[in-house]
Image (cartoon, helix red, strand yellow):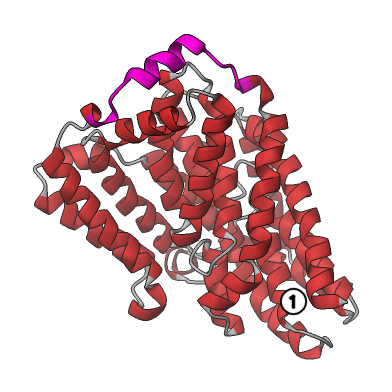
């Protein structure tokens, strides 16, 4: 390992410690770490800002920007209040029933949309319904971020790493649906059971507030029916374009920006009002994080770690799949899974040619580890970071360790359940 690679690794670890300790705001830590990476030449401007392999993933940044604008316009129609009252009434004011309903919706939506878009849509509803029922919102938001990562594992479009894997391995939307969706259904059911235990203190039932909710008419919450129709029409087109990505070949970021621009154009909302809802600190944090991880890619740190894991398997399919699964889960907990999968894909492609049996088992192990490992820490997945940003903006601070203490349990359980699935279906 070169001196620059060692310095890059030290800077990344130090920045991560600062983020985890919360002695420095995560945006300051990420920007500071990115600046040091540039100063020590662990990465350069061309690589940091323009490289697809090791630069800022502008597709993620602009996807977030576009969807934040769309969500901001939707918020002004009153539709989130409508959905909050509807969900609370369907759950009859029972907190755990409410969480189950929200988690199922989140997991299903994340399979069709990307998981970041899903949490952007579900979080405002969660804030409102928890306020109505006097429930702590943090457990619901944490659980929804995790449900989005689990649900997004099921399809090609649900999580960005799956798109990278599909491109490299020649897998289709139906391949992911057939091979991963059955397992994701099981994982979602197990996860809901875990939530009953992990967040049991949050399920405080208030009969009076529940009775008040049951008396409300959700239709009265709609404030602007014309804007609602316009917003839902644009959102419907955006969602359809997301799902039809394999056919239309428009990147989700392009679709989101076009949708946001069209919505601002056709509605009476002002540009200032539309941009006011954007979570700018979250976007800046992502940019800094991408630069830091890109420096690890540029200096070969991630490649060396990945190759060491691959070499340790000695070409045995079962061992290779298990190492891939657990190593991917562990690494995706501390680095963004997009550059990790981009770096690991050529290694897996090479291994798949030399490992006997079904070569696709290695791709499924990589996808499951990278997608589910994102639940382990507060910065392990894009959806987690977005949830923390939304919570902070709305006056509810979710600390790194508050998220991570639950995330580690969920990750270990869900990844462990992948082991018998991979063995029974592909390796025996």
Quadrant showing the C terminus: bottom right
Left or right of 394 on screen, residue 75: left
Crowding at mark 1 (Cα within 10 Å: few <14, some 14-19, many 20+): many
Classify residue 4 by image quadrant: bottom right
Left or right of 160 on screen, residue 340: right
Q: Position of residue 147 (x, y in %)?
A: 58, 46
> From what the image shows, is residue 410 above or below residue 196?
below
Q: Position of residue 128 (x, y in %)?
A: 39, 26
Main SS of the magenta segment?
Answer: helix
Nearer to us in this view, 415 or 287: 415
Q: Position of residue 107 (x, y in %)?
A: 53, 51
Q: Position of residue 222 (x, y in %)?
A: 21, 32
Nearer to us in this view, 4 or 136: 136
Q: Residue at x 10, y 52 (%)?
A: 266
Farthest residue to the top: give it: 208
Residue 305 is at least partly visible in this image: yes
Residue 300 is at least partly visible in this image: no
> From what the image shows, is residue 264 above or below residue 207?
below
Classify residue 85 by image quadrant: top left
Left or right of 376 on screen, residue 88: left
Nearer to us in this view, 66 or 221: 221
Quadrant showing the N terminus: bottom right
Q: Residue at x 77, y 68 (%)?
A: 324
- Pointer 1 residue: 361
Tell me, yes or no, whether the highlighted magenta stretch contains residue 189: no
Tell me, yes or no, whether the highlighted magenta stretch contains residue 203: yes
Nearer to us in this view, 377 or 246: 246
Q: Residue at x 61, y 83 (%)?
A: 169
Q: Residue at x 83, y 66 (%)?
A: 323
Which contiguous range is marked in magenta? Answer: 202-219
């Amino acid at each position: 390992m070169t001196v620059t690679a060692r310095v890059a690794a030290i800077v990344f670890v130090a920045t991560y410690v600062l983020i985890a300790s919360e002695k420095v705001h995560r945006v300051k830590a990420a920007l500071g770490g990115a600046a040091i990476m540039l100063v020590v030449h662990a990465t350069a401007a061309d690589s940091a800002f323009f490289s697809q392999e090791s630069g800022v993933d502008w597709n993620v940044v602009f996807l977030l920007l576009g969807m934040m604008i769309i969500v901001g316009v939707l918020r002004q129609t009153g539709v989130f209040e409508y959905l909050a009252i509807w969900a609370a009434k369907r759950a009859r004011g029972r907190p755990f029933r409410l969480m189950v309903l929200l988690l199922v919706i989140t997991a299903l939506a994340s399979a069709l949309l990307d998981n970041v878009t899903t949490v952007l849509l579900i979080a405002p509803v969660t804030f409102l319904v928890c306020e109505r029922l006097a429930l702590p919102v943090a457990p619901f938001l944490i659980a929804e971020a995790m449900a989005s990562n689990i649900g997004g594992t099921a399809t090609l479009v649900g999580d960005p790493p799956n798109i990278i894997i599909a491109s490299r391995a020649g897998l289709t939307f139906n391949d992911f649906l057939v091979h991963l969706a059955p397992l994701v259904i099981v994982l979602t059911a197990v996860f809901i059971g875990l939530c009953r235990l992990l967040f049991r203190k949050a399920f405080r039932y208030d009969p009076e507030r529940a009775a008040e909710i049951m008396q409300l008419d959700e239709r009265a919450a709609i404030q602007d029916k014309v804007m609602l129709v316009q917003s839902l029409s644009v959102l419907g087109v955006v969602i359809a374009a997301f799902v039809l990505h394999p056919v239309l070949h428009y990147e989700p970021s392009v679709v989101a920006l076009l949708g946001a621009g069209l919505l601002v154009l056709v509605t009476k909302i002002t540009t200032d009002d539309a941009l006011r809802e954007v979570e700018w600190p979250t976007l800046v944090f992502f940019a800094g994080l991408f630069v830091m991880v890109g420096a690890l890619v540029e200096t070969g740190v991630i490649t060396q770690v990945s190759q060491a894991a691959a070499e340790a398997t000695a070409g045995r399919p079962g061992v290779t799949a298990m190492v891939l699964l657990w190593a991917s889960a562990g690494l995706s907990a501390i680095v963004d899974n997009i550059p990790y999968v981009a770096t690991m894909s050529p290694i897996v492609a090479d291994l798949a040619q030399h490992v006997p049996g079904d070569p696709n088992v290695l791709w499924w192990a990589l996808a499951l580890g990278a997608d589910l490992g994102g639940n382990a820490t507060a910065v392990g997945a894009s959806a987690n970071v977005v949830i923390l940003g939304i919570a902070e903006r709305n006056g509810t601070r979710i600390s790194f360790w508050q998220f991570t203490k639950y995330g580690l349990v969920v990750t270990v359980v869900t990844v462990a359940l992948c082991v018998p699935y991979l063995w029974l279906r592909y390796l025996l």
